[in-house]
Image (tube, grey):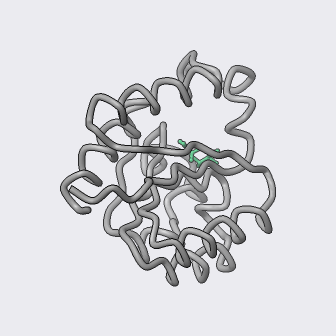
Amino acid sequence: MSKAKVLVLNGPNLDRLDLRDSSIYGTMNFDQLSSFIGESATSLGLEVEVRQSNSESEIITWLHEAADNRNPVIFNPAAFTHYSYAIRDAAAMLTAPLIEVHLSNPLAREEFRHTSVISGVSHGTIGGFGPDSYRLALIAMKELI
Ligand code: DQA
C-alpha cells in the first residue's frame, strides 16, 4: 500500500457546520468531523491531513501542492462544486486520484446544486451519507492508491 498522505480538503462554510441546517448537514461540527475523518483513516491504515478554507485562492494553492507532491485528494468543494472553473482546472492537474465528497446528496436538492464542475475531473463522487461519505471515500481511496 502506498504511504502517500491523503489530503482531505474542504471548501467554504464547512467550518460552520454546526450553524447550518442540521436536517441537511447533521449535527457534527467541523472539529468533530475532522476527528471522525482522522479516526476512520487510522482504522484503515491511511495517513490523512484535513484542511478547510473559505478562500478559492487558498484551495487552488493546496491543489497545486497536492499535484506537486502526488498526494491523493478527497475533496468536498462545498458551493465551489457548482461553479468554480478555476478549482476544476487546478483539480485537473492532480497527479494522484481525486474523490469528490458531499455530506448531503446535491442531486436531491436545489437545481443549482445538480451541476458539479468537479465531477468530470474526479475518479468518482460520494454524497448523501453525512460524515460516512468521507469514510466511504477513504475506503475507495485505499483501493485506488
Ligand atoms: C455540500 C453541498 C453543497 O451544495 C453545499 O454548497 C455545501 C456542502 C455538501 O457537503 O453536502 O456547502 O458540498
Q: Is residue 91 left or right of residue 145?
A: right
Q: Where is residue 57 in the image (x, y as percent from the top left)?
A: 79, 68
Q: Is residue 49 left or right of residue 61?
A: left
Q: Which residue lies furthest to the front in this view?
A: 3
Q: What residue is drawn where x is 60% and y is 56%?
A: 77
Q: Nearer the viewer, residue 7 or 110?
A: 7
Q: In this view, does 25 lie to the left or right of 38?
A: right
| As drawn, 49 above or below 89 | above
- Which quadrant holds the N terminus? bottom left
Q: What residue is drawn where x is 27% and y is 59%?
A: 2
| As drawn, 89 above or below 131 | below
Q: Which of 77 and 6 is in front in this view?
A: 6
Number of numbered tags placed on the structure image: 0
Q: Position of residue 11 (x, y in %)?
A: 67, 51
Q: Name the image quarter holding residue 56.
A: bottom right
Q: Position of residue 25 (x, y in %)?
A: 56, 28
Q: Which of 80 and 43 is in front in this view?
A: 43
Q: Where is residue 88 in the image (x, y as percent from the top left)?
A: 58, 76
Image quadrant of ligand 1? top right
Q: What residue is drawn where x is 46% and y is 65%?
A: 71
Q: What residue is drawn where x is 57% and y is 43%?
A: 50
- Which quadrant holds the C terminus? bottom left
